[in-house]
Image (cartoon, rainbow, N blue to C red):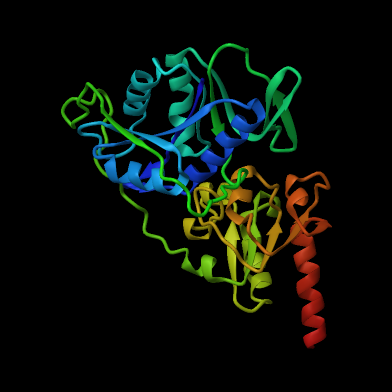
Amino acid sequence: MKHILVIAEIFEEMIRPVTWELVAAARRIMDLENSGLIKIITLSDDPLSLADKIAEQTGVDVIGLKIPGCMGYDSDVYKQALSWLIKNMEPSHILTAHTSQGRDFAPGLAIRLKAASISGVNKIKSDHKGLIYSRSVLSNNQNMILRPVPGIPVVLTIMPGIFKFDAHENIKKGQMDIFEAPFDFGSDSSGSICHKRIIKKACENKVLKQADIIVSAGRGIGEKENLEKIFQFAKCFSFSAVGASRPLVDTGWIGYEHQVGITGAVVTPKLYIACGISGSSQHLAGMKDTQFVVSINSNPHAPIFRHSDFCIVEDAVEFIQAFLKCKADREY
């Protein structure tokens, strides 16, 4: 029976929640193919406690790969160690998260395993010929349907926030196997790149996570000066905060503490107002559990509209200006 392998996402010796979503995606594949055996792989200098927790929470068998000297994520380490472990397992699928970590090592791992590679998978289906995968293209406005070459393994990076993990009560704990990689990745022998330490940027996104209403800005606001209107708009609501898409943070328009998405804050407000945000999968994953979503965008085909309760097809800045003027007139 072919293995469906899940690479657990570990950061600072903690299991990231996207790992459970990968297990849900693996179960989806197993159900569609009506075959397969899921196993989860976790890498660490000391993987025992991580493997134990994963086995307990998922009921899936776990392989803990002990890598002496591996104190944090390293692309070269992951590719070498995983290819060494996986090459004799003959898996049908290897799943990792479409995060900065997964996107980094997945293509290189696929090359080493002589496997197919599909990134950013947002849907898994099947037809009479077998499994097919969907991924977003053209600025998330369209989906591309892909079918890998049969008979070879496929490495998939799965979009966070797509597959929901259902925890079962009274689940039987999975079995654990601990292996040690036959190489040392200590700081003096890890090759051209080695992990030293993680330096975190000082920021605070508690305001975002505690807000009842979030007004978020995207590239559709046009220019940095229009952020002032976003802040004015947010002040019209009680218990509100200002959020932003990653492009605005990357360009330096606004601080990282405002970023909503996979690499920013994951928020669950009562109301989320997206202003000029197209709706990338990474951003949607950060606000997917919002109770009510209002989107303002001049593009009627913006992907964000497919995930909104109320859609306003209008230039976001012009709409906000009209809203603020109307509010000022009423107060006057």
Quick check: can you spot residue 322?
A: yes
Q: Quadrant of residue 331?
A: bottom right
Q: Position of residue 99 (x, y in %)?
A: 50, 39
Q: Is residue 45 left or right of residue 29?
A: left
Tally the numbered discs.
0
User: Is 290 placed above or below 100 here?
Assistant: below
User: Is 274 placed above or below 262 here?
Assistant: below
Q: Quadrant of residue 322?
A: bottom right
User: Is 256 placed above or below 113 here?
Assistant: below
Quadrant containing the C terminus is bottom right
Q: Position of residue 142 (x, y in %)?
A: 75, 34
Q: Is residue 95 left or right of residue 275?
A: left
Judge by depth and name the residue closer to the eye, 88 or 9: 88
Q: Position of residue 202 (x, y in %)?
A: 36, 59
Q: Quadrant of residue 55?
A: top left
* Residue at left offset 36%, top offset 45%: 11
User: Is 151 placed above or below 312 here?
Assistant: above
In the current view of this chain or complex, which residue is farthest to the left? 188
In the current view of this chain or complex, which residue is farthest to the bottom? 332
Q: Position of residue 227 (x, y in %)?
A: 62, 62
* Residue at left offset 18%, top offset 31%: 186
Judge by depth and name the residue closer to the eye, 12 or 39: 39
Judge by depth and name the residue closer to the eye, 104 or 165: 165
Quick check: can you spot residue 158?
A: no
